[in-house]
């Protein structure tokens, strides 16, 4: 179980500091990530721990490439939103296509799991790119102290969130529109789950000369307004009522942004409710996730939803809410869901549900590593070694969630 986890990480942190010529410093202000574990990894990197070398080298390569990425902005892509305001985020539903029986194709019809190329012509792609690039740069800065990484991350955040000419307005009124049916939906909120990375990136940028108190306040102000919209708007309320991965990731976003802007009461309420509202109804006693298994990409969505529950559990650690060990009387729990999916790690068990593109066992790797750390069960780590044609040594997870 997790009883000795904090003691173990504290011991690791102290040990790496004693071995390092450069102090890892105070743990960063992060929420979905583990601050003590990140600080310990920083100490290990400074001490030249060769076990982390492949992952650090890949991170440096990715960060060097990221210096040339962007800028990203809702004002630079795609058609003008229905509002006429370029600062409004706009996307279309990925699985909606023109109706071939209609001359104008309207209204669009749904083909679950089949992505319409139009999906990539709006703001979804640059939004995801911005989140990924900023996380890469912030982590690389935190672990190496290379200032140009922080400077570029700060520039990209300013462009997306608060620069007067390029900023995104803090709402998603036009997220995942369906031509001929609607100009936006609550489902569109799934587009911004990458923003969870942004709050943690800001924590890793703290202390950089490129990330000022003014920058921090500007970002917190934006997220405070976005949080209000998520809680109060019709689309926010729609997504809060979702029964599948959309509801899970809605809660993860709300809890993350609430912690980031200092509204801990909101975060604790969402996280306390998540046990009975998300985990209990979405995970069967044997670990299956029926809402996700009904999809045409059932394996991918099962992994995605469980990643959201892992995020909720991590946020719960920051807010004093234990979701890792929540269990219903009939056995529904995060751990049970991991166990069910873990049987497919070695690629030999038959996946009996529809999965367009086939099952990719390597998608289980981050979940198995996190489960190994959280539950102290060596079997999860053993499962990682059984994933076919996969070497985790250089993966980002080795820096965010390294093996014990």
Image (tube, rainbow, N blue to C red):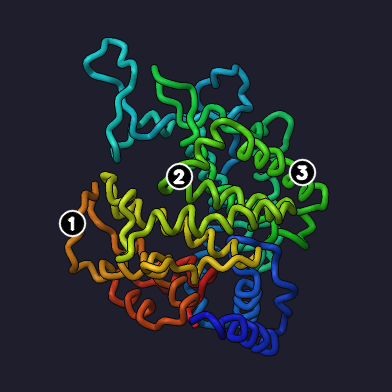
All told, the count of numbered labels is 3
Q: Residue furthest front?
A: 329
Measure the C-alpha gap from mark 2 to mark 3. 28 Å
Of the residues tagged 2 and 3, which is closer to the observer? 2
When asked about the image quadrant of residue 47, the answer is: bottom right
Q: Secondary structure at mark 1?
A: loop
Q: Residue furthest top?
A: 103
Confirm whether residue 117 shows in the render: yes
Q: Is residue 268 above or below residue 404?
A: above
Q: Could you tell whether 41 is left or right of 18 in the image?
A: left
- Residue position marked by numbered label 3 in the rendering: 218
Q: Residue at x 65, y 50 (%)?
A: 257
Confirm whether residue 152 shows in the render: no
Position in image of residue 128 (x %, y %): 51, 44
Q: Could you tell whether 231 is left or right of 359 in the image?
A: right
- Residue position marked by numbered label 1 in the rendering: 352
Measure the C-alpha gap from mark 1 to mark 3. 49 Å
When asked about the image quadrant of residue 24, the answer is: bottom right
Position in image of residue 282 (x %, y %): 39, 54
> What numbered label is drawn on residue 246?
2
Position in image of residue 210 (x %, y %): 76, 54
Q: Secondary structure at mark 3?
A: helix
Label 1 vs 3, first from the N-terminus: 3
Position in image of residue 49 (x %, y %): 56, 83
């Amino acid at each position: 179980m997790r009883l000795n986890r904090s003691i173990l990480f504290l011991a690791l942190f102290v040990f790496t500091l004693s071995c390092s010529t450069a102090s890892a410093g105070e743990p960063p202000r992060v929420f979905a990530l583990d601050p003590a574990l990140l600080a310990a990894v920083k100490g290990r990197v400074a001490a030249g721990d060769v076990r982390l070398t492949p992952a650090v080298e890949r991170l440096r390569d990715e960060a060097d490439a990221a210096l040339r990425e962007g800028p990203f902005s809702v004002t630079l892509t795609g058609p003008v939103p229905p509002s006429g305001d370029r600062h409004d985020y706009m996307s279309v539903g990925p699985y909606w296509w023109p109706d071939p029986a209609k001359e104008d194709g309207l209204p669009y019809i749904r083909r679950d799991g089949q992505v319409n190329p139009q999906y990539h012509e709006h703001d979804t792609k640059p939004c995801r790119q911005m989140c990924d690039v900023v996380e890469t740069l912030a982590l690389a800065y935190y672990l190496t102290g290379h200032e140009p990484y922080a400077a570029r991350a700060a520039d990209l955040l300013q462009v997306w969130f608060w620069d007067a000419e390029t900023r995104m307005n803090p709402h998603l009124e036009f997220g995942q529109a369906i031509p001929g049916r609607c100009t936006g939906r609550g489902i569109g909120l799934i587009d911004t789950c990458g923003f969870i990375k942004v709050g943690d990136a800001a924590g890793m940028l703290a202390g950089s000369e490129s990330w000022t108190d003014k920058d921090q306040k500007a970002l917190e102000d934006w997220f405070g307004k976005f949080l209000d919209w998520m809680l109060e708007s019709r689309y926010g309320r729609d997504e809060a009522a979702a029964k599948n991965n959309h509801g899970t990731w809605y809660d993860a976003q709300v809890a993350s942004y609430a912690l980031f802007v200092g509204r801990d009461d909101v975060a604790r309420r969402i996280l306390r409710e998540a046990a009975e509202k998300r985990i209990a109804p979405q995970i069967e006693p044997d670990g299956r996730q029926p809402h996700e298994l009904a999809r045409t990409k059932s394996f991918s969505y099962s992994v995605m939803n469980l990643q959201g529950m892992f995020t909720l559990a991590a946020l719960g650690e920051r807010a004093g809410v234990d979701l890792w060990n929540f269990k219903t009387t009939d056995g529904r729990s995060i751990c049970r869901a991991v166990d069910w999916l873990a049987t497919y790690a070695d690629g030999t068990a038959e996946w009996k549900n529809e999965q367009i593109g086939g099952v990719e066992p390597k998608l289980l790797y981050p979940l198995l590593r996190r489960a190994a750390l959280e539950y102290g069960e060596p079997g999860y780590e053993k499962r990682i070694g059984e994933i076919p044609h996969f070497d985790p040594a250089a993966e980002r997870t080795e820096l965010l969630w390294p093996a014990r």
